[in-house]
Image (cartoon, grey):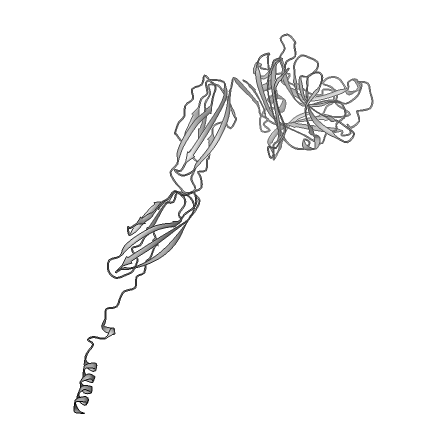
Amino acid sequence: MNKFVFVIILSLLVTSCGGGSSDSSQSETTALIPKIELLNSDIIAGDRIQLSGAKSEGSGSLSYLWQLTSKPSDSQVSILNDTSQGIEFIADVSGEYELMLTVNANNRSQSTSLTVNVAVNEPPVINIEYSDRLTSIIAGETVSLNAQQSNDPEQHELSYLWQFLSQPESSNQSSTTNDYLDFNPLVRGDYSIQLSITDGYNTATLVLDYKAVETRSLLVPNANSNLSAKEQVEAVFGEGSLDLPETHDAEHFAITTDSDIGDHFSFTLHLEQDGDRAIPIEQTDRQRSEIKTYANSPEQLTCEQGEAMSVFWQFKTDDIGLSYSFSHLFQIKGEADHPLLTFTARRVSNENNALRILHSEQDTVLAEIDWDLVKQRWLDARIDFSCQNDGYLKVVIADTSNQQELVSLDISEIDMWQDIALDKLGFKFGLYRRVKLYADDELFREGLSSLIDKVYVGTIRIETH
């Protein structure tokens, strides 16, 4: 009995005094928290992405493991098992890059991820200052093209390359890496120049086409000039280059201005009063208010056999009266009675009027535009041709406001010469029309109901190739 009690007391003493320190006195383990810090912001394609794991938390020595777990499909970036505390790489394309950081300490590991959004790297913006806005250059003269005002939206440094994509066979224009180009073509012909500007990531390009010509003449109407409209024309086209009604004392030719193209020539015909130059209306079937280049004009304004030329101008008409007879707005004509090429407005049916491009004495219709697309709007016109029997002809007419092409002709072989000895082909701009069937008729042609009709012509440029 006594032995039994003694054993129980001894067991209680051991239980109450043994076991060492309690759980509260054991060392606490610090939490392991991986943290990713993005060291730069507003990242665009081509920039460096800089990441740091230095702010990760944990006891003991930390080790790091970086992995790229997602990237844009066209990216070439590769990061695999990088053990640095921080990493950086170039984001080669725009899009989302997802990175995972795993931090290890005391045989434990924790991971976290961060998605970096990379914006699109916009290409450089090309801005060229031109010493001459025309696309033709007289061979031997210099045009300066200055790209120094070009810029990069992300402010990257720009580099430049001017290349000649094409040039005449005997020309030796070379590439340059300056931010400007002084273009001096010595050989006549076509030149195609490409400017490439790069920010190191994207490249912007611009192609400029030029033609080096033998001569270039400009007739530019100027409402503020001390010279009259007639004097301005004759200063360029030569004395006698105006054909106006002379028997009716009214204004037939002037310089006016509008908000679309600025200063321009205005041609006016009065149906019941105007005759043909010095012939009164009672004795003629036609009227004209035109400017022209002709045999007495400077030689660079007329085309001799074998030459090639280009003519550029702008024109516009009011809603003028049209009959089944001709109303020429432009002519190429030599000494022959009939013009070689015309832009002719006329009635083509009881319901419709049109502008037709007519060729030769047969008045072959090369193109036709509905008159509603022509009247009361400015049009840009260009003609390229060679003065020979087996010549070529190109014609473009476009709406000035939006450059929509209404006509685009390219005829590689066409008779562009009238076989008259010592002839020269000249150009006529304005309005020349037939108003009666016969000179002594008292009635005007059907459709000619407007008492005053006006046609307008802007700057005229004539080039010899």
Snapshot quadrant of residue 262: top right
**Residue at image coords 65%, 26%:** 254
**Residue at image coords 39%, 36%:** 158
Residue 40 visible to an observer of this rendering: no
The quarter in which the C terminus is drawn is top right
Vertically, is 51 above or below 440? below
Snapshot quadrant of residue 417: top right
**Observer-nearest residue: 247 or 53?**
53
* Identity of the residue furthest to the top in this view: 421
Vertically, is 218 above or below 43? above
- Quick check: 313 left or right of 31? right
In the rendered image, residue 430, in percent from the top left (x then y), is placed at: 67, 24
**Observer-nearest residue: 327 or 248?**
327
- Quick check: 381 left or right of 148? right
**Residue at image coords 71%, 28%:** 354
Vertically, is 215 above or below 61? above
Snapshot quadrant of residue 389: top right
In the rendered image, residue 218, in percent from the top left (x then y), is placed at: 56, 22
Residue 410 visible to an observer of this rendering: yes
In the rendered image, residue 392, in percent from the top left (x then y), is placed at: 60, 18
Vertically, is 17 above or below 64? below
In the rendered image, residue 380, in percent from the top left (x then y), is placed at: 61, 28
* Identity of the residue furthest to the bottom in this view: 1
* Identity of the residue furthest to the front in this view: 1
